[in-house]
Structure formats: structure tokens, C-alpha cells
Amino acid sequence: PAAKIFNSAYTTNLGLALAIQNKKTFWVGDALNHNCIIRAMRIARVPSHHKAIFAHNDIDHLRRIMENDIPDGIERVVVIFDGVFSMRGDHAPIGAINAALEPHRKRFKEGLVTVVDDSHGIGAYGATGRGTEEICGHNVDIMVGTFGKAFGVNGGFVAASEAVVEAVRQKADTYIYTNPLSVADCAAATAAVEIADSEEGLARLKNVRDRIAQFRGGLDRLGLESIPGKHPVVPLMVRNTEKTTRMVEAFGEAGILVVGLNFPVVPEGDQTIRFQINAAHTEADIDAVLSVLERIR
């Protein structure tokens, strides 16, 4: 195992795609992948006939793509997806993805590679904060992550085999031709990782889980719609632009920061308010948010 640090997870994904793309590579991605994954494929000049998109977390669709849509002459397949989908708070079913891909593992000369961008999972998800792999109990071949979410500082990373990381070092434009992280960023990231991997970090994770359960329980009591999950990102499905805008403004007036997602950021009918719970939130904080929700819903 090896890793390489970049100045953001966004540039990590770009660099990784540039390093592993060639004319005989086929890419498969989830329909709700983050913009940086979509942009990475474009910058790496993946042609349209060398990529396919499966419906969000739809394993049957992924299976059909693997069986029917990969043209002759392909020597490597990259299956890439978010670990936690940041607008929804749900996660990729890594075990089911691996099972769907298993019959094809030996089919391609240069292999079948799974890549997860777990920027919203690492440090915040799982019993010890090890992200979507820990939640699912299954691993991927390449992991991309960030120091900019749970760890609170600049930077991104890719973790993979020594051969992949060496290819990234030699071929990734976003690693070679830009400034590295500062010493201060590296020191802060190291300290944050050490905290996350300590008893203090486990206590913070427990508080996050407790506050998530408290908030979701409150949404249920109020009869409000969300997407099931246990991640700190909790979406409230409003499904109306005017109401979403009005509610976000009301939260702001109450001193509560939430993010409203309206068309075209999300499809018409999927208008959402995104809540993000963190380790500093208290039981009283969550009660205050629920009180505002009860008043303005």
C-alpha cells in the first residue's frame, strides 16, 4: 500500500484519471458522482464510447453494463463512485458492487479497478471513522479522500498499490505542475488524523452518531421526509423551490446555517435542504434546529 498527497481531493481525482487513462480503458460511474469525477473523465479525454453511467446505486444496471456495453479491445475497466453522496447522505454499496464485478475480474488484460472518492466518509463515517469501506465491510482498489471535510484542513490524497501511486507520481499533471501542500497544512492534517484515531476521536464520533439519531428522530416525529441513512449529511426533501428558499432564509434569521438545493443544482421535484451535523453540536443545538423546523415547515 502507498499514498500520495495533493492540494485537494478535486485535483487528486483529476490527476488519478490522467495517470490511469489510456486508449484501451473503459470507465463506469454512478449517475450521482461528484463533479470532480465527471470533470476528471473529461480532462483525461475519455471518449463517450469508452464510458457508461449506471443509475444511482443500481447494481442490476451496473451488472448489465459489464455484461453488454463494454466494446471489444478494452484492456482495463475502471469502476468509479462516491463513497458517500454528499447531497443525499447515502453511500455506495461496496459489497454489492464488488459482487457484481467479480465474474469480470479476470476478463481484462490490465485488470478491473474499483475507485472510491470517500471524501465525505473518511473521518466521519463508520465505527472508527474509516469511512464507507468500514460501514460496508468491503474494500476497493483505489481510494481518494480529502483533508478538507472531517479533518478541517487543505489537501487531498490517493491511496492504492505502490504501482498505481508511482504512476500517479510520474503522470498526474495536477501533482507535477503545481505547488505542494504547505508544511503548516501537512502538520495540521497529521494532527487531525491523530485526533480522529484516538479515544478523543472515538468520543467525537459517538457524539456525531447520537446527534444524527436525535435529529432524524425529530424529523420522523414532525412527519418530514428525508433519505434514510446514518451519515452526518441529512437531507430534508422539500420538493418546492419557493418553500426551500423561504425555509433557508428563516433558518438564517434564526442563526442556523443550512444549504438549500434548488433546480438546476438538483432535478425539479428534488429540492432539498441539506443539514450537516458535526462533533461540536450538542443536544440543545439539535433541539433548537427542530424547534425552528416545527415552526416554519
Image (spheres, rainbow, N blue to C red):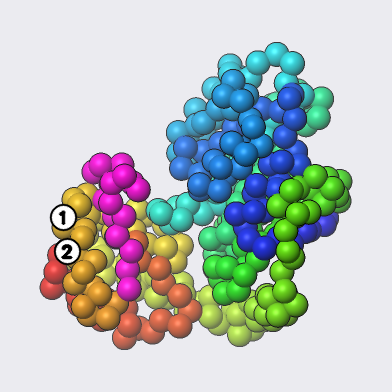
Query: Which residue is label 1 attached to?
Result: 242
Instruction: Judge whether 31 appears above or below 70 on screen.
Output: below
Q: Can residue 95 be seen in this view?
A: no
Q: Residues within 10 Å of mark 2 (few under 14, many from 20)?
A: some
Query: Which residue is label 2 attached to?
Result: 246
Q: Give the range drawn in magenta.
A: 257-273
SS for callout 2: helix
| Amino acid marked by disc 1 | Glu
In which image quadrant can residue 294 be found?
bottom left
| Amino acid marked by disc 2 | Arg
Q: State the residue in front, 230 or 119.
A: 119
Horizontally, residue 85 falls left or right of residue 69, namely left
CB atoms of marks 1 and 2 within 8 Å: yes
Q: Can residue 87 be seen in this view?
A: yes
Q: Where is residue 57 in the image (x, y as percent from the top left)?
A: 48, 40
Horizontally, residue 106 falls left or right of residue 217, namely right
In which image quadrant can residue 65 be found?
top right
Q: Where is residue 86 in the image (x, y as percent from the top left)?
A: 46, 56
Position of the N terminus by quadrant:
bottom right
